[in-house]
Image: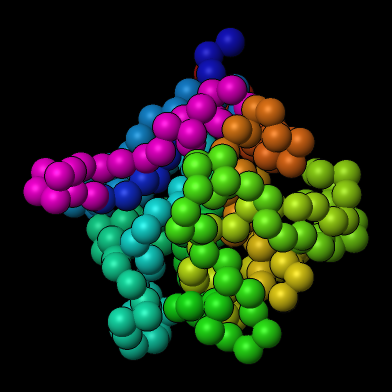
């Protein structure tokens, strides 16, 4: 059987501070291949290069990855400040309308870190520029020292909604995750259901209410060693199943046409 194609929405970057590239971490492709059983391709996240309609036709599902650039605050009605960090306006221009179109079409996607924040913004929510500055919140940022293993190690618990999509997926109402983000959800969009929170109340797992397809997103980074991790593996496996189902449905419609 042909593997379903998953488009990876990555980031714009400058190689050696001068050569423009579209990037995605290798661990994203590894997670999609090893845990989801899908064929990963990196989509150039720029609406001047690709359209929402074209990539939706090409792909069966989408992975909205993490990344250093943040969603521009104008996308959720806030003024830009130094705390908002750096931006990738081209990615904003593709990812946000793409998420809304996927929700309505029932086409599966999984959001990670920045992708989690994009899902909330696309659906009418807002972001806090620096979680650790909010009263009672912990520092969710990536450790500045240590190995890659250290930086992606589990650092806090997440409590999941009883009977919710994530609790059913993981078979547990409490899990432990890594944390490598500065921003986070301030207000959830009208259809954004928060199903997981860290010990300090920070939103960590969301889904879209009433969406016909797989629309899950997490604030942590499950792509790290996804095929071996007991939490990451079922998440990526479920995403892969959703992509296979969508691919089969698409092929069925094509044959009937």
**Up/down of 238 relative to 74, above or below:** above
Residue 198 in the figure: left or right of residue 3: right
Task: Compare residues 58 and 13 and report the one nearer the observer.
Answer: 13
Q: Residue at x 72, y 67 (%)?
A: 198
Residue 172 in the figure: left or right of residue 54: right
**Up/down of 107 relative to 139, above or below:** above
Task: Compare residues 119 and 70 and report the one nearer the observer.
Answer: 70
Residue 6 in the figure: left or right of residue 47: right
x then y, percent, for residue 205: 68, 60
In which image quadrant can residue 197 be found? bottom right
Asked if residue 30 lies in the magenta stretch, the reply is: yes
Residue 158 in the figure: left or right of residue 52: right
- The residue positioned farthest toward the left in the image shown: 18
**Is any part of residue 93 visible from this angle?**
no
x then y, percent, for residue 13: 23, 50
**Is any part of residue 134 visible from this angle?**
yes
Task: Compare residues 242 and 65 and report the one nearer the observer.
Answer: 65
Asked if residue 99 lies in the magenta stretch, the reply is: no
Q: Residue at x 63, y 52 (%)?
A: 178
Task: Compare residues 124 and 195 and report the one nearer the observer.
Answer: 195
Query: Which stretch did the figure color magenta?
Result: 13-35
Q: Residue at x 81, y 60 (%)?
A: 160
Q: Residue at x 81, y 63 (%)?
A: 159
The quarter of the image holding the N terminus is top right
**Up/down of 132 relative to 195, above or below:** below
């Amino acid at each position: 059987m042909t593997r379903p194609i998953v488009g990876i929405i990555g980031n714009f970057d400058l190689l050696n501070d001068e050569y423009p590239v579209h990037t995605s971490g290798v661990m994203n492709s590894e997670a999609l291949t090893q845990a989801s059983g899908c064929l990963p391709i990196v989509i150039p996240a720029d609406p001047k290069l690709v359209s929402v309609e074209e990539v939706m036709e090409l792909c069966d599902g989408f992975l909205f990855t993490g990344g250093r650039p943040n969603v521009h605050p104008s996308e959720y009605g806030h003024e830009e400040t130094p705390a908002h960090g750096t931006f990738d306006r081209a990615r904003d221009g593709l990812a946000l309308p793409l998420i809304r179109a996927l929700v309505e079409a029932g086409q599966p996607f999984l959001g990670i870190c920045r992708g989690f924040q994009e899902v909330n913004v696309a659906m009418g929510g807002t972001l806090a520029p620096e979680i650790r500055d909010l009263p009672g919140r912990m520092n969710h940022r990536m450790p500045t020292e240590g190995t890659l293993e250290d930086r992606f190690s589990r650092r806090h618990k997440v409590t999941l909604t009883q009977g919710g999509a994530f609790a059913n997926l993981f078979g547990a109402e409490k899990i432990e995750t890594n944390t490598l983000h500065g921003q986070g959800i301030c207000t959830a969009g009208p259809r954004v259901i928060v199903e997981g929170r860290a010990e300090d109340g920070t939103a960590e797992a969301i889904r879209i209410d009433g969406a016909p397809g797989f629309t899950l997103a997490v604030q942590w980074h499950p792509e790290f060693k996804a095929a071996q991790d007991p939490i990451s593996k079922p998440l990526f496996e479920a995403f892969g199943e959703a992509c296979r189902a969508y691919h089969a449905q698409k092929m069925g419609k094509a044959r009937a046409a």
